[in-house]
Image: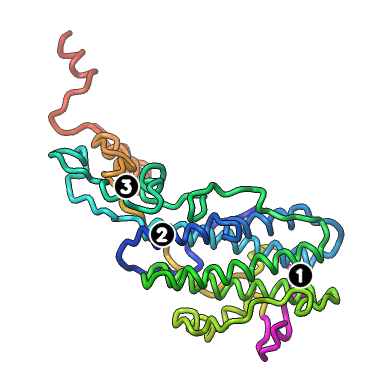
């Protein structure tokens, strides 16, 4: 079973909309080495795990559950980079093109117009080229050492790709999220490298991880200084044996120690996505909005029924018209 908390694992920093940055970040979501791939790969490996080497299963699954929160974070970030571009200034309930204007004209010039045609200014399960995410990206060999090595490759490749995405835009919304993911990718590299070490695998010779100083990025350095790259979370309510592996000196031999925690020490509010009349989302009907508002009032009032729900003052329903004729 899984439980969900309506909070984000990292805050989304506000900045101006940037559709091009949003499209670049799609690679980090639905690309071959993106968050959807790591989420599904680690979860399938844990669900299909054989034998009684429970600490390794707990490690793989703990990282996999964290990846669910990364998918949530990156989709919210992409949506925020898209949302408000363009900003529709008309009345909520009028047809956006009323008066001869073209509310979404700029969408034609974007790298991925599907963000506006299919997604209503929101994230999609695709890569930066618009290719749909594929389950064929997921590797679950059934051999523990091979799975761990594959996971190490995925994290190392994903980390270097996110560093490239970071360099593509100065947008604060993009950089804050990507910086967090760079740091957590390093933590996951450490997790899988440490697991391989406990199995006697000299992973550093077999599979050297790309070496570069990501602390050159200010947002990344702040998180590294907080030690987020040496923490891993179990997200378990019934106990975990992950600490048997993820503890002690870092496998990167940098003098740091690995720490297993139940969950991150902080979480952050999910930004509310505003309505987008130009995308006809969530709708342009006044009466449906009135019904939704009345339902909210009903719940907040403890179940007290409000008369004439959803009927505008002075507006006759079909039933009242029928009664009048009689």
Q: Say which residue appears at 60% left-offset and 57% top-offset.
A: 32
Q: Is residue 218 visible?
A: yes
Identity of the residue drawn at 51% across and 50% down: 126
Q: Nearer the viewer, residue 70 or 113?
A: 113
Q: Is residue 255 magenta?
A: yes
Query: Residue 288 at x, y = what percent?
Result: 29, 35
Q: Position of residue 61 (x, y in %)?
A: 70, 61
Residue 21 located left or right of residue 182:
left
What is the residue that sits farthest to the top in this orientation?
A: 326
167 lies left or right of 59 = left
Which is nearer the N-term, disc 3 or disc 1? 3
Q: Is residue 308 above or below residue 103?
A: above
Residue at the disc numbered 1: 241
Q: Quadrant of residue 11?
A: bottom left
Residue 52, above or below 195: above
**Tag 2 secondary structure:** helix
Circle 3/circle 2 CB separation < 8 Å: no
Mark 3: few, some, or many residues within 10 Å (few <14, many ≥20)? few
What is the secondary structure assignment of the residue under circle 3? helix
Q: Earlier in the sequence, mark 2 or mark 1?
A: 2
- Residue identifier under label 3: 108
- In front of the other: label 3 or label 1? 3
């Amino acid at each position: 079973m899984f439980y969900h908390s309506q909070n984000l694992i990292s805050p989304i920093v506000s900045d101006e909309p940037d559709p091009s940055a949003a499209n670049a970040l799609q690679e980090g979501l639905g690309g071959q080495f993106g968050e959807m791939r790591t989420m599904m790969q680690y979860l399938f490996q844990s669900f299909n795990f054989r034998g009684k080497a429970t600490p390794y299963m707990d490690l793989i699954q703990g990282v996999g559950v964290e990846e669910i929160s990364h998918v949530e974070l990156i989709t919210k970030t992409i949506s925020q980079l898209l949302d408000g571009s363009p900003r529709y200034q008309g009345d909520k309930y009028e047809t956006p093109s009323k008066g001869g204007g073209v509310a979404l004209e700029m969408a034609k010039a974007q790298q991925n117009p599907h963000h506006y045609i299919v997604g209503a200014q929101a994230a999609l399960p695709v890569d930066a080229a618009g290719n749909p995410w594929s389950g064929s990206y997921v590797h679950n060999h059934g051999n523990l050492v091979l799975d761990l090595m594959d996971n190490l490759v995925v994290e190392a490749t994903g980390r270097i790709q996110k560093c490239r995405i970071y360099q593509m835009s100065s947008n604060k919304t993009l950089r804050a999220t990507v910086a967090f993911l760079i740091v957590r990718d390093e933590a996951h590299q450490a997790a899988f490298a440490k697991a391989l070490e406990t199995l006697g695998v000299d992973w550093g010779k077999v599979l050297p991880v790309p070496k570069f100083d990501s602390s050159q990025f200010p947002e990344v350095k702040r998180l590294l200084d907080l030690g987020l790259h040496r923490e891993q979370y179990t997200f378990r309510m019934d106990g975990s044996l992950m600490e048997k592996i993820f503890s002690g000196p870092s496998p990167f031999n940098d003098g740091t120690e690995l720490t297993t925690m139940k969950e991150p020490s902080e979480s952050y509010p999910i930004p509310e996505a505003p309505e987008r009349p130009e995308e006809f989302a969530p709708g342009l009907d006044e009466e449906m909005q009135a019904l939704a508002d009345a339902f909210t009032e009903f719940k907040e009032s403890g179940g007290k029924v409000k008369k004439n729900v959803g009927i505008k003052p002075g507006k006759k329903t079909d039933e009242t018209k029928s009664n009048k004729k009689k």
